[in-house]
Amino acid sequence: MKRFSQILLYVTIVLLLVWQLPWCYNFFTSKPEKTPFTLYSFVIDDFAMMGQEGDKGMVRRDLSGNTYTQAQFDSILPMFYVRQLMADERFPDTINGVPVTPRLVQMENFNFRTVPSDINAPRIGLYPLLESMSGRVDLKMPGDVFRITDTGIEFVTIASNTIDHEKSSRFTEAMKKKGFVFPALEISGNPTTRKDYDEGYMLLDANRHLFHLKQVKDRPYVRAVDLPAGLELKNLFITEFKNRNTLAFMTDVNNTLYVLNNKPYAVVKVGIPAFNPEADAMTVMGNMFDWTIRITRPHTELYYAVDANDYSLIKVMELPASELSVAEKVGKYIFPLRLSFTSGTDKYVRARF
């Protein structure tokens, strides 16, 4: 027994050293990455970048190598620097021949971001369904949550922890009438009151058919969305942008990115190569003319400019990952074996060597 205890102690000490020594080394030697801020500029038809460059300080340039002053940089990105141009009294009346106002620009601008840990994470399986048309300006959290089972949708009253059978029956029947096959394979929503409006949830049923579910005046709103032939969706991301032009971003089993337009419900393929939300991070910064899509992978940064109307590809830029620092190279050499329990790509806690 004593020998077993000693072996257990030694194993524990080794595991602690393999875990803590590399962590401490990285903590004291790591440096922040200096990825330049990058946006596509329709004014110059090129990517515009801004970042620190050694002794030069803050440098603003485009992909062709042209440099810009701060005021010039504001001018080539008028949709992003709209407030600064207003303050300088330099905001144009028309852009690309389209009459614009600061209010219109701010309504059309949006940001979207998803990271792998959003996908690779445990799910509670309980979702609040807000009232989408309450008649009030502010949204309000409901007094119940729903879950989708193999036989239907169930609403659970939070205060009493009991199932609201009447409401559950109404919503289940409405979903079945629209062709929904239980259970749901994917549920995507934005359950918060800190937004301008509510579009409920986008759902994939057991046959991977797409549905839109929300609550309107205490009644179920269910819409089956027609998909192009052969399209098999996998991941859904509801958008709820201020301009209300889109309902969701979606990817299929081949990691192709799609947009679900609003009014009418139309599924449109985005003209970029594969995006795998389970492994890649994606940031979208959009305006009324174009979107800049940034795909972050372990060893590269990919930037795509796409048209805001038909999502066709305009331009591509790739930034390779920066080389390992001397400290990182030394760390890989002196700590060939490492133990960690968390990862930046998921929200699970488990041993990883």
Image: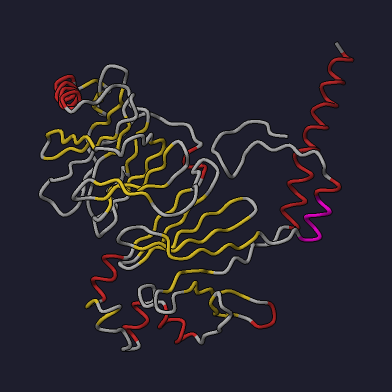
Residue 3 vs 20, above or below: the answer is above
Q: In this view, does 161 lie above or below 113?
A: above
Viewed as shown, does residue 36 lie left or right of 22?
A: left
Residue at (82, 32) in percent of width and height:
13
Front position in the image: 80 or 87: 80
Is 208 one of the magenta-colored residues? no
On the image, the x and y values in percent for residue 338 come to 76, 39
Most extreme residue toward the front is 229
Q: Look at the image and tell me in which quarter the N terminus lies.
A: top right
Residue range (magenta): 325-331
* Predominant SS of the magenta segment: helix
Residue 8 picture quarter: top right
Q: Position of residue 84 (x, y in %)?
A: 37, 81
Residue found at x 38% / y 59%: 312
Residue appearing at x 58%, y 62% in the figure: 318
Q: What residue do we see at 87% from left, 21% from top? A: 6
Quadrant where the C terminus sits is top right
Image position, residue 286 (x, y; %): 37, 63
Q: Residue furthest top?
A: 1
Residue 47 location (% of width, % of height)? 49, 72
Q: Considering only vertical position in the picture, is 319 above or below 92?
A: above
